[in-house]
Image: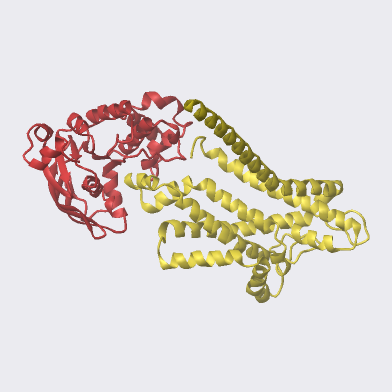
Chain colours: A yellow, B red
């Protein structure tokens, strides 16, 4: 009798457990969909609105004066690439270098605490303030807007994200791996650069990509620095066009033609970011062996 | 060729914790010497003092002298130089996770700027043969990651990595404690073969292991070395009552 009762109890619990499991799985899948949905929605909407205006002219022509049909954003695409290259040139080495210092050499030191605090504050500074800072530091002394100042503003924005993710990723490298290198008679600096940083490289690259993707769409820091440009310019000393700036100006204009170009520009901007991130991932993953943790 | 190790009045601290007290002993060249004792008795700290790994911990301190061959390792030399001459194998296998098998073995040389490819190929092959891993991995040296090997293979990879820089002394800190019996016996066979060319110091919790591989055995207790003698004497007729209690399983 008793045994049979325990059996029914077990069966009941097993059924309950099955239900709980199903519900939890459902909620997890639902959350995933909710996370992906906005991205998919934006992407689909951009394709619907922007793809029609995409043609060869968009990639080869510079903007036409108001009233003339056609024209493209070739100068803004080149400008964005220039600005992002400048920003990465500044932000990636300083960010990674700072992260290495925080995790490996300055652990526990006052300077490290100060740097960490500064990086966190810098991360929270509104992007338009970054633009103002670059304006005061570069545009005012030089007396004119320039690509350089825009690149610097974006570069400074990249530093805190890269610095802190690099630190976190390096701290995740097991102590045993560091000991192995030191035990072989490898000098500490060499062990840090060739072993610890290499072991953490996948995470560090992800940090750089996050920072890159974030500043790629920034408009505010460029308003007082790169300014934008309706004409061809590749000079670092002249104002330069940028996709986000161009989108901003076109989207606020009263012309339908410009609105369509703004949609196309947004689509191109997102595709460029996705391409850049995928390219870096592909190139860097080829060297890393499968099965590496 | 291995060299002997002469330790005089070695004391070591972690913060205010006096983990090693007045250790004096002579470790013979080209033999295996085992260090036994209960957990926390200082045997790991002792081997870490022999290649100056102890001082990588910022709160650690050490006094006394250690001579390896004719080199006083705490005077007139650098930790980096010492660690090239004194290889170490750790308790848990710790291959470099992002490197291939080949690069793991070559790491010690490559990271010190040694780049002669043909010589590297030879050294990698010789080291892997010496660590009895060559036959198992020779076909995928550069394709497979060191981390994808089994635990026992990883440990032999770590031994190969240590041998590749051609050390005179090989320190092994419980090299088989994380491994299954088959892998353990492979490591022991290896120690048997290697001790004719290297001076081997092995820390172990396994007394049968000490008896099987070592000519000399030291018994550590509470940061002191209680007894150091031939392995045969330690296990059959120890001079000290505490050694006898430990090896007969009365404590520890």
Which sits in the foreground, A41 or A209? A41
Counting from the top left corner in percent of width and height, residue A13 is at 55, 34
Name of the residue lying farthest toward the top? B135
Counting from the top left corner in percent of width and height, residue B148 is at 45, 33
Name of the residue lying farthest toward the front? A1
Q: Is A68 on the left-hand or right-hand side of B227?
A: right
x 53%, y 58%: residue:
A163
Which sits in the foreground, B209 or A76? B209
x 86%, y 57%: residue:
A259
Quadrant in the picture for residue B94? top left
Q: Note whether B156 is above or below A204 in the view shown.
A: above
Q: Is B38 on the left-hand or right-hand side of A123?
A: left
Q: Is B144 on the left-hand or right-hand side of A285?
A: left
Name of the residue lying farthest toward the right? A67
Which sits in the foreground, A177 or A69? A177
Q: Note whether B91 is above or below A100 in the view shown.
A: above
x 64%, y 59%: residue:
A86
Counting from the top left corner in percent of width and height, residue B68 is at 19, 46
- The answer to whether residue A54 is visible is no
């Amino acid at each position: 009798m008793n045994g049979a009762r325990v059996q029914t109890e077990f069966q009941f619990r097993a059924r309950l457990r099955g239900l709980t499991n199903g519900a939890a799985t459902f909620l997890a899948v639902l959350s995933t969909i909710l996370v992906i949905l906005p991205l998919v929605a934006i992407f689909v909407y951009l394709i619907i609105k922007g793809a029609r205006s995409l043609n060869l002219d968009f990639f080869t022509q510079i903007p036409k004066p108001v009233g003339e049909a056609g024209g493209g954003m070739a100068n803004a695409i080149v400008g964005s690439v220039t600005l992002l290259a400048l920003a990465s040139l500044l932000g990636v080495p300083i960010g990674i270098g700072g992260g290495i210092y925080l995790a490996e050499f300055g652990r526990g030191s006052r300077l490290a605490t100060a740097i960490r605090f500064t990086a966190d504050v810098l991360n929270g500074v509104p992007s338009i303030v970054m633009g103002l800072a670059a304006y005061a530091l570069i545009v005012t002394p030089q007396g004119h807007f320039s690509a350089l100042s825009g690149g610097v503003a974006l570069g400074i924005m990249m530093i805190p994200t890269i610095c802190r993710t690099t630190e976190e990723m390096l701290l995740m490298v097991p102590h045993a791996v560091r000991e192995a290198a030191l035990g072989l008679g490898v000098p500490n600096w060499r062990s840090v650069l060739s072993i610890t940083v290499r072991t953490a490289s996948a995470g560090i690259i992800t940090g750089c990509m996050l920072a890159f993707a974030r500043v790629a769409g920034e408009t505010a820091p460029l308003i007082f620095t790169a300014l934008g440009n309706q004409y061809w310019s590749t000079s670092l000393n002249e104002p330069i066009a940028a996709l986000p700036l161009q989108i901003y100006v076109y989207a606020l204009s009263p012309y339908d033609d410009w609105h369509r170009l703004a949609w196309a520009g947004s689509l191109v901007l997102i595709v460029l970011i996705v391409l850049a991130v995928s390219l870096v991932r592909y190139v860097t993953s080829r060297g890393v062996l499968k099965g590496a943790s | 060729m291995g060299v002997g190790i002469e330790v005089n009045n070695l004391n070591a601290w972690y913060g205010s914790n006096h983990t090693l007290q007045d250790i004096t002993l002579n470790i013979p060249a080209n033999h295996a010497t085992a260090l036994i004792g209960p957990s926390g008795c200082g045997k790991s700290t002792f081997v870490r003092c022999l290649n100056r790994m102890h001082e990588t911990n910022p709160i650690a301190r050490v006094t006394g002298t250690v001579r390896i061959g004719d080199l006083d390792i705490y005077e007139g030399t650098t930790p980096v130089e010492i660690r090239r001459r004194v290889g170490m194998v750790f308790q848990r296998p710790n291959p470099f996770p992002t490197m291939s098998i080949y690069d793991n073995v070559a790491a010690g040389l490559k990271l010190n700027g040694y780049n002669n490819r043909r010589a590297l190929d030879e050294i990698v092959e010789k080291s892997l043969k010496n660590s009895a891993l060559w036959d198992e991995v020779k076909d995928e040296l550069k394709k497979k990651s060191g981390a994808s090997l089994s635990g026992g293979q990883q440990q032999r990879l770590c031994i190969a990595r240590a041998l590749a820089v051609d050390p005179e002394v090989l320190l092994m800190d419980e090299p088989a404690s994380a491994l299954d019996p088959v892998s353990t016996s492979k490591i022991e066979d290896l120690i048997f073969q290697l001790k004719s060319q290297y001076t081997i110091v092995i820390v172990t919790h396994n007394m049968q292991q000490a008896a099987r591989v070592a000519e000399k055995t030291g018994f550590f207790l509470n940061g002191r070395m209680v007894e150091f003698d031939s392995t045969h004497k330690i296990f059959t007729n120890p001079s000290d009552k505490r050694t006898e209690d430990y090896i007969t399983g009365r404590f520890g």
